Amino acid sequence: MTKVNYYKFYGEFLKNTKMANKNQRSAYEPKVRAKWYFLVEKVGKTVDEVCDLYFISRKTYYKWRTKDLGSKKYEPRKEHPATKIKGDIKKFICDEKLRINYGPLKMKYLIKRRFEVKISTTAIYKFYKKKDLVFRPQKKLAWYTPLKEHVIPYRPGDVVQMDAKYVWEDNTRKYQRTFIDIYTGLQFATVTNTMTAEDTINAFLAAEKYFTFKIFGVQSDNGSENRGDFHKHLVEKGIAHYFIPKSSPTWDGAVERAHGVIDQEYYLNPRRTWKNLQEYLHFYNYERIHLGKYLNGMIPVEKLNQYLSTVSPLKVN
């Protein structure tokens, strides 16, 4: 179509429009609206194409079409056959959704097999929502309750943090289990070839013998070696087992820090004078000065003796 034809169409449009005031300003000027109608009626564009071109809705197009020319009221899109869900299919979808909880795509194939009818996944999902059949995956409930705030120790043994780390001995990767008493800073560690619940129990029994005080609570992550038999062992002995939140190693800050120190001072130290881990632990607990909230320049055994002097004449040398 030429420009002459458009201007002729525009002139006819202004002559025939039913708008009371042709010069009335609106969101869409008469010249713009005339282009809509021209493209649809003379050029052959569809209403949808014109709406996309001018960023308007079909409802807006037909609203102005009715105001301007008094015909062709808003016509909603005809429902595509693939969006219709009727009769027995509705009941079938509800029953199967509750039975096997298929998603829209699998349900589409199931309906096609059963009824030889094609229904779009969009239609099936909308039907799910309408019937409240959208089931989100059920989160696996934790068998334990993680800590929501830090446990504050008031005596030795109230909270013993434990964790495991890899170490290399004789060109073999092994596992070190470390126990730190938060109140005194005393550390015990042992190395094993495997990392099972049984190894964890044995390591804990060795820690109990090493520490000269009763352990009332153990804090750990939720690794498999800390659950099951080991957790049961603590429960049977009446020892509280505190689990830190998932993926939150900072909650075990004391034992994590101890791992960093033992790497720096023992495993990775080319000038170390200790022949084995036990000698280093003796230095750590009986000679090394510690900083931090509970020690503040003291040696762990000094902190323990300080506490014992307030409750008992016995001291640990």
Image (tube, rainbow, N blue to C red):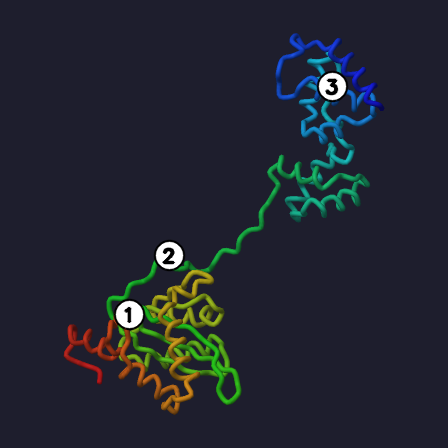
Quarter of the N terminus within the rendering: top right
Residue furthest right as drawn? 1
Amino acid type assigned to the residue bearing label 3 in the image: Ala
Distance in Å between CA atoms under marks 2 and 3:
66 Å
Mark nearer the viewer, 2 or 1: 1
Q: Earlier in the sequence, mark 2 or mark 1?
A: 2
Q: Name the mark nearer the viewer: 2 or 3.
A: 3
Q: Residue at x 70, y 28 (%)?
A: 54
Query: What is the C-alpha distance between the residues marked 1 and 3?
Result: 80 Å
From the image, tell me which residue sits under label 2. Answer: 148
Name the residue type under label 2.
Answer: Lys
Q: Say which quarter of the image contains residue 154.
A: bottom left
Residue 292: which numbered mark, if any? Answer: 1
Q: Residue furthest front?
A: 4
Disc 1 residue type (three-letter): Gly
Horizontal relation, residue 105 to residue 177: left or right:
right
Label 2 close to label 1 by CB (< 8 Å): no
Q: Nearer the viewer, residue 191 or 26?
A: 26
Q: Element at badge 2?
A: loop
- Please tell me how crowded label 2 is: few (under 14), some (14-19), or many (20+) other residues with Cα within 10 Å: few
**Does residue 154 lie above or below 130 as drawn?**
below
Q: In this rendering, would 229 be left or right of 120?
A: left
In 3D space, how far apart are the residues under numbered discs 2 and 1 (Cα atoms)?
Answer: 22 Å
Q: Position of residue 295 (x, y in %)?
A: 25, 72
